[in-house]
Image (spheres, grey):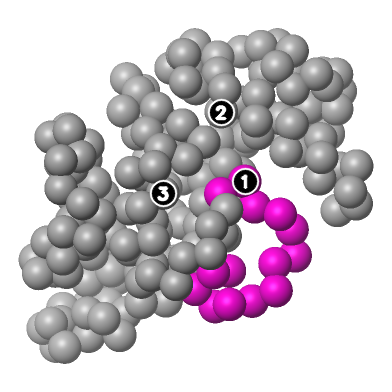
Amino acid sequence: MDRRQRKTREAIFNGFTQLLSTKDFNQITVGEIIDRADVGRATFYSHFETKDFLLKEFCKELFCHIFDNQNDEGHDHKHIFSCESSEPVFLHLLQHLQKNDNNILALLSSQNNDLFLRYFRSNLERLVESQLNLFESRKNKKLPMPFWKNHIVSTFVETIRWWIDNGMKESPEVITEYFLMIV
């Protein structure tokens, strides 16, 4: 992706996240996004097939950032989520949620967050797969691996929901500790 394409993509992400601070995802239109991003409709559709695809890419961006930081790889693009965290991956993700980077909490708490949670879960599955060594000693040998991974992902998603529903009073460190205790 060249510099011009990257800047356009960033402008679209920025316009989208600005709108998330005031509206639920399903109330946001492509027209509003392109107005905020100051790009044309054809430009939007050359980057994202639909508004749902924009949401999917937004979620991918969060996890791509975490994977890149975890692996200390050279970044092939500028992330919309930026930090230099050397924290464990689950803590790192919770820290982004606590900071509400790019209004991500609006997606998690919106009335129709099923689509975001589906994308979030699919990326989280990859994250869990990369961290299975954290959980290996706790796995019952009789459990099939797909069931075990699903259990870990579901537990993390529900931990996040509980944390948000209870006002995020605990620190990300405490929530990470809780999560690791129960898996």
Q: Secondary structure at mark 1?
A: loop
Q: Kindly report the secondary structure that dominates the magenta region of the rendered protein.
A: loop
Choose between 100 and 149: the one closer to the eye: 100
- Give the mark nearest the N terminus, 1 or 3: 1
Q: Is residue 43 left or right of residue 111?
A: right
Q: Amino acid at mark 3?
A: His
Q: Amino acid at mark 1?
A: Ile
Q: Residues within 10 Å of mark 1 (few under 14, many from 20)?
A: some
Estimate the spatial distance between the alpha carbons at disc 1 and disc 2, rounded to whole Å.
10 Å
Would you say residue 181 sits in the magenta stretch? no
Q: Quadrant of residue 98?
A: top left
Check if mark 1's residue and mark 2's residue have beta carbons within 8 Å: yes
Q: Residues within 10 Å of mark 3 (few under 14, many from 20)?
A: many
* Residue 84 point in image, percent of width and height: 53, 64
Q: Which residue is mark 1?
A: 80
Q: Which residue is mark 3?
A: 96
Q: Is residue 165 left or right of residue 133?
A: left
- Give the mark nearest the N terminus, 2 or 3: 2
